[in-house]
Amino acid sequence: MTRTGQELFATAAVTSFKLNGQFLGIAEELARPSGITVAWWQVLGAILRRPLPVAGIAREMGITRQSVQRIADVLEGKGFVEYKPNPAHRRAKLVAITESGHDAVRAIDPQHAAMAKRLVAHLGKAELERVVDALTTLSAALDALEDDATGAA
């Protein structure tokens, strides 16, 4: 039986919701020993390579700007991030990870590597690459549809 586009879209959505829950559960287990929450890890992960404004982190992570602002303020209070001037926008400061923030993320690495090894052993590297490529393609397509709908394209 051939599934319609609507059925495929619905199945993709429901599967993504389930995946999100599964990843959050795994991430909670991975993050717990380092003393950070999944939400903190998410924000820190967005700025590992370069500082971003709160709105940029929100876009990158698919969460609200207000949530990112609250988390960034907590992370600043704990010394995991610092606010820096943004040459592109006077009022929208950049959120930059500190060495303590890097240390917290690095503390997750051993458990993260072990989980990755288990997943590769279960799926195989080629299959995991295919899945990652498919998810990346799906995410880009949804971004494009959203841009089309808002006229931002």
Image (cartoon, rainbow, N blue to C red):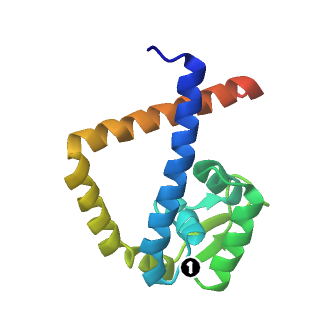
Instruction: Find residue 71 and report its horizontal and vertical position in percent.
Output: 68, 71
Residue corresponding to mark 1: 80
Residue 80 showing in the rendered view: yes
Does 150 sit left or right of 44 as displayed?
right
> Against 111, is 100 above or below?
below
Q: Amino acid at mark 1?
A: Phe
Q: Does residue 153 show up?
A: no
**Residue that protrudes farthest toward the front in the picture:** 1
Q: Looking at the image, which is closer to me, 37 or 93?
A: 37
Front residue of this view, candidates 72 and 13: 13
User: Number of numbered discs present?
Assistant: 1
Q: Is residue 147 above or below residue 89?
A: above
Q: Is residue 135 above or below residue 87?
A: above
x and y, in percent, of residue 106 in the image: 38, 75
The x and y percentages for residue 82 are: 62, 75
Q: Give above or below for 15 relative to 29.
A: above
Looking at the rendered image, the quarter that the N terminus falls into is top left
Tag 1 secondary structure: loop
Residue located 52% across and 62% down the image: 24
In the displayed structure image, the side of residue 60 where residue 124 appears, left or right: left
